[in-house]
Amino acid sequence: MNASDIISLVHPALAVGFVFPIIGIVTYFAWQTRQRRLQTKQGHKSKIPPVVGPEHLQMGRWLSGSVVVLSLIGLAHPIFGNIISKQLWQDNLFQVVFIVLIFIFTLVSLIFLYRGREAKWRALFATLTGMGIVILGSQEGVFRRTNEWYISHYYYGITVALLMVFSLAIVEDIYKDRSLRWRYVHIILNCVALLLFVGQGITGARDLLEIPLSWQKPTVYKCDFKNKTCPQAFLPQKLEWVSFKL
């Protein structure tokens, strides 16, 4: 493996080592929080400590930001890899500068989203963060598998990132809304996000198997992926067994 191959492992390594454990923690606290709320509503004394609510909120905010940053890391590798391989700055310097500014713009918008308290500012910075993610995802070099969008790691990832941005934007509304409308929206969308996270684990593992190492790409990409065949010159030669007499 060369440097490019090692860098490509940063995204899945962070997902497995950092983000997916947080998903488990947030899911556990979410279940505990709901169980305590239901027990209290029925007039029972719950054995679940009240701290689970604040812990769920804190870990949920960690998860949302981590997913967005992880998505940006996953997009950065193919985008800048394409820029370097094609030396894009020589032909279109504006596009390179634009891409770099969009990355910075998206991260800054995410930071302001965390700090926003008024609904209009949260809506603004959530929209800007989401726009940055979508714009970066549409850049050349990103492997999207559009013809199979329903099992695409890219489309699952973009959808989850947008759901996490939306979750950050409505946190304040969940606690202020006495009708519980925003709470139910939060529960439904994050159940969808949980299913997509499972899909991310499956499609991510599949893509790691399918994407060849950098030095293998010139040969592997000459294969016919639709018909699952490769030129005969690239197939392993038949082994010849030689017997020896003692």
Image: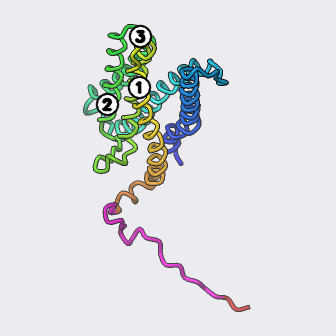
Which structural element holds mark 3?
A: loop
Mark 2, other Cα within 10 Å: few <14 / some 14–19 / many ≥20: some
Nearest to N terminus: mark 3 or mark 1 = 3
Q: How many marks?
A: 3
The label on residue 184 is: 1
Q: Give the residue at x 51% y 24%.
A: 60
Q: Give the residue at x 36% y 36%.
A: 79
Of badges 3 and 2, the one in the foreground is 3
Direction from residue 111 to residue 96 in the image, left or right: left
Q: In the image shown, does 140 or 121 lie closer to the viewer? A: 121
The label on residue 134 is: 2
Give the x, y percent position of residue 142.
35, 40
Q: Are marks 1 and 2 in contact (CB under 8 Å)?
A: no
Q: Give the residue at x 27% y 28%.
A: 95
Of badges 1 and 2, the one in the foreground is 1
Direction from residue 27 to residue 99 in the image, left or right: left
Asked if 121 appears above or below 60 in the picture, the reply is: above
The label on residue 116 is: 3
Give the x, y percent position of residue 104.
39, 20
Residue placed furthest toward the bottom: 245
Three-letter code, disc 2: Val
Mark 3, other Cα within 10 Å: few <14 / some 14–19 / many ≥20: some
Q: Is residue 70 magenta?
A: no
Three-letter code, disc 3: Gly
Give the x, y percent position of residue 204.
46, 46
Nearest to N terminus: mark 3 or mark 2 = 3
Range covered by the magenta-colored residues: 224-243
Q: Is residue 231 magenta?
A: yes
Q: Mark 1 and mark 2: span between their CA atoms?
A: 26 Å
Q: Mark 3 and mark 1: span between their CA atoms?
A: 22 Å
Nearest to N terminus: mark 1 or mark 2 = 2
